[in-house]
Image (spheres, rainbow, N blue to C red):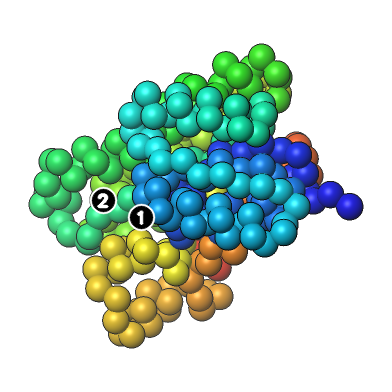
């Protein structure tokens, strides 16, 4: 019996670690053929090799990609289709944060880096795949936003703003692309057990963890598995009537 994504071809950016790796593992387990795209080539290769060795229903291959560069994004989409076939799913997961600080103190070059990875990369990837999806009158784009775009926290102003942009871009493109049979959705995770956790908290200490966890009703961080499960549902045919949704995977943080 096939999985929920049996035969689907997907790209997962930032797939070499954290939430992206969790999404890759779930997609492959559910039968998808996945291109693991990451600027950290070793991480992408390790996740792809792990999936290949797991004897899961799908397959995975790795590619080093800087998703802020148009030529890399074009090559990424072409590689996915040449290796695995016509693209069905694009997951825009790559992103970055900044250390908690007053909004006026963030260096300009760091602001530019956040804008490039959290916003520009989604623009570039959607610009590349949308004509393909329109021609087939099918396709799913999943953007990984954040609870920071729904319920902003102090001293993370520019990260919050970038994720608010992702939410608006998701909803706007969902309305525009629906007549072409294309769905656009997003996930809003709370901070999780990923390499970015220390960035959000400023420091990773038991005291800081306890303070952060006290704001999450379910009392734990998001995990890569949580994001993989939610992404699998939203990208599957089971969610064929769902578009424009930005689903919180946050243990109640935004209530």
- The residue at 42%/78% (across/down) is 214
Q: Earlier in the sequence, mark 1 or mark 2?
A: 1
Give how far across and how far down residue 229 sits, in percent: 65, 58
* Quadrant assignment, res 70: top left
Q: Nearer the viewer, residue 170 or 136?
A: 136
At label 1, counting other C-alpha atoms closer than 10 Å, the crowd grade (few under 14, some 14-19, many 20 or more) is some
* Residue designated by label 2: 157
Query: Is residue 9 found left or right of 241 in the rendered image?
Result: left
One can see residue 150 in this view: no
**Occupied quadrant, residue 202:** bottom left
The residue shown at (53%, 25%) is 78
> Is residue 185 found left or right of 234 in the rendered image?
left
Q: Is residue 205 left or right of residue 244?
A: left
Expressed as whole percent of the image width and height from the top left, the position of residue 98 reads 25, 55
86 to 5, vertically: above or below: above
Judge whether residue 115 can be spotted in this image: yes
Q: CA distance from mark 1 to mark 2?
A: 7 Å
Secondary element at image label 2: helix
- Please state the horizontal and vertical placement of residue 59, each as a whole percent of the image: 66, 47
Residue at 55% in and 52% down: 48
Depicted 64 relative to depicted 230: above or below? above
Element under disc 1: loop
Residue at image location 76% in from the left, 39% down from the top: 7
Marks 1 and 2 close (CB-CB < 8 Å):
yes
Q: Is residue 106 above or below residue 193?
A: above
With respect to residue 129, does 40 lie above or below? Answer: below
Q: Which residue is mark 1?
A: 152
Depth check: 254 or 188 in front?
A: 188
Horizontal relation, residue 246 to residue 211: left or right: right
């Amino acid at each position: 019996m096939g999985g929920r994504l049996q035969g689907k071809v997907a790209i997962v950016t930032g797939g070499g670690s954290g939430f992206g790796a969790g999404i890759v593992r779930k997609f492959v387990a559910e039968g998808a053929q996945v291109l693991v795209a990451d600027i950290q080539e070793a991480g992408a290769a390790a996740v792809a090799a792990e999936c290949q060795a797991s004897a899961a229903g799908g397959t995975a291959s790795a590619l080093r990609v800087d998703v802020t560069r148009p030529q890399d994004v074009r090559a990424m989409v072409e590689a996915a289709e040449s290796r695995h076939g016509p693209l069905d799913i694009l997951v825009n997961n790559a992103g970055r944060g900044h250390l908690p600080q007053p909004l006026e103190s963030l260096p300009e070059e760091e602001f530019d880096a956040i804008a490039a990875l959290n916003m520009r990369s989604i623009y570039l990837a959607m610009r590349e795949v949308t004509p393909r999806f329109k021609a087939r009158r099918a396709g799913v784009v999943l953007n990984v936003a954040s609870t920071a775009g729904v319920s902003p926290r102090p001293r993370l102003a520019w990260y919050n703003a970038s994720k608010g942009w992702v939410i608006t871009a998701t909803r706007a493109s969902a309305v525009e692309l629906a007549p072409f049979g294309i769905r656009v959705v997003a996930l809003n995770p709370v901070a999780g057990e990923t390499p970015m956790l220390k960035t959000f908290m400023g420091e990773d200490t038991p005291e800081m963890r306890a303070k952060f966890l006290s704001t999450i009703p379910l009392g734990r961080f998001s995990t890569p598995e949580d994001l993989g499960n939610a992404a699998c549902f939203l990208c599957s045919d089971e969610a064929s009537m769902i578009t424009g949704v930005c689903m919180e995977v946050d243990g109640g943080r935004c209530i």
